[in-house]
Image (cartoon, rainbow, N blue to C red):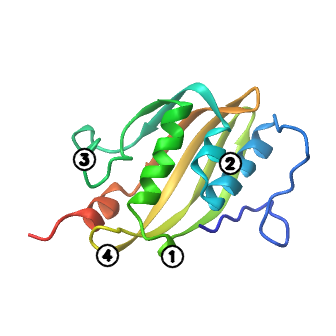
């Protein structure tokens, strides 16, 4: 995955201090950097033990075998599982994400961008625009709400008829 924000350094990485980040922008930039690295356990370290995690998909689509990461979550362990499941169901060499904007207002942040991935089970690629609403409290993500083009994702994983 490639993550770039308006505030990225020339090499595409966000500036980080050696101390644990607590401000919203720094935590979100670090989260995006870790997502780009692809280590679910390190990503999950930035989530609170309990949180509010929602995906804007029709409820009947939650937990399908083809897309098990599509479901609401509530714990740090759930966050790690989410990123593992996404990785398990996509072709890693054919994954890219472009972050177009990172907007911050107090403890809330909104990340806007586009994902480009390929479903491992079907070989179909897809592009989906997304908005990610995060809340950071005491240096940890407590809210993770995703709004994306669920139809594009579902069609990429749909079995041939």
Label 2 secondary element? helix
Q: State the separation of the CA atoms marked 4 and 3.
A: 18 Å
Residue annotated with mark 4 = 123
Q: Residue furthest left?
A: 161
Name the image quarter holding residue 136.
top right
**Does 159 appear above or below 51?**
below
- Whether tag 4 and tag 1 are in contact, CB under 8 A, the answer is no
Quarter the C terminus occupies: bottom left
| Residue appearing at x 80%, y 45% in the figure | 26
Q: Which mark is residue 93?
A: 1
The answer to which of 102 and 91 lies nearer the viewer is 91
Q: Mark 3 packing: few (<14 Cα in 10 Å), some, or many (20+)?
A: few
**Does 101 appear above or below 62?**
below
Which circle's residue, 3 or 1, is located before the other in the chain? 3
Residue annotated with mark 2 = 31
Which circle's residue, 4 or 3, is located before the other in the chain? 3
Which tag is nearer the camera, tag 3 or tag 1? Answer: 1
Which circle's residue, 4 or 1, is located before the other in the chain? 1
Residue annotated with mark 3 = 64
């Amino acid at each position: 995955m490639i993550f770039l924000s308006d505030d990225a350094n020339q090499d595409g990485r966000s500036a980080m201090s050696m101390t644990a980040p607590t401000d919203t922008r720094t935590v979100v930039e670090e989260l995006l950097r870790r997502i780009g690295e692809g280590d679910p356990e390190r990503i999950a370290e930035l989530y609170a033990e309990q949180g509010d995690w929602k995906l804007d998909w029709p409820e009947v689509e939650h937990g399908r075998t083809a897309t098990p990461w599509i479901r609401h979550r509530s714990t740090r362990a759930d966050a790690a599982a989410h990123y593992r499941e996404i990785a398990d169901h996509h072709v890693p060499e054919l994954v890219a994400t472009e972050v177009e904007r990172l907007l911050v207002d107090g403890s809330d942040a909104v990340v806007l961008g586009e994902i480009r991935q390929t479903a491992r089970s079907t070989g179909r690629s897809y592009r989906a625009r997304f908005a990610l609403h995060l809340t950071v409290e005491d240096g940890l993500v407590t809210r993770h709400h995703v709004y994306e083009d669920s139809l594009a994702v579902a069609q990429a994983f749909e079995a041939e008829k």
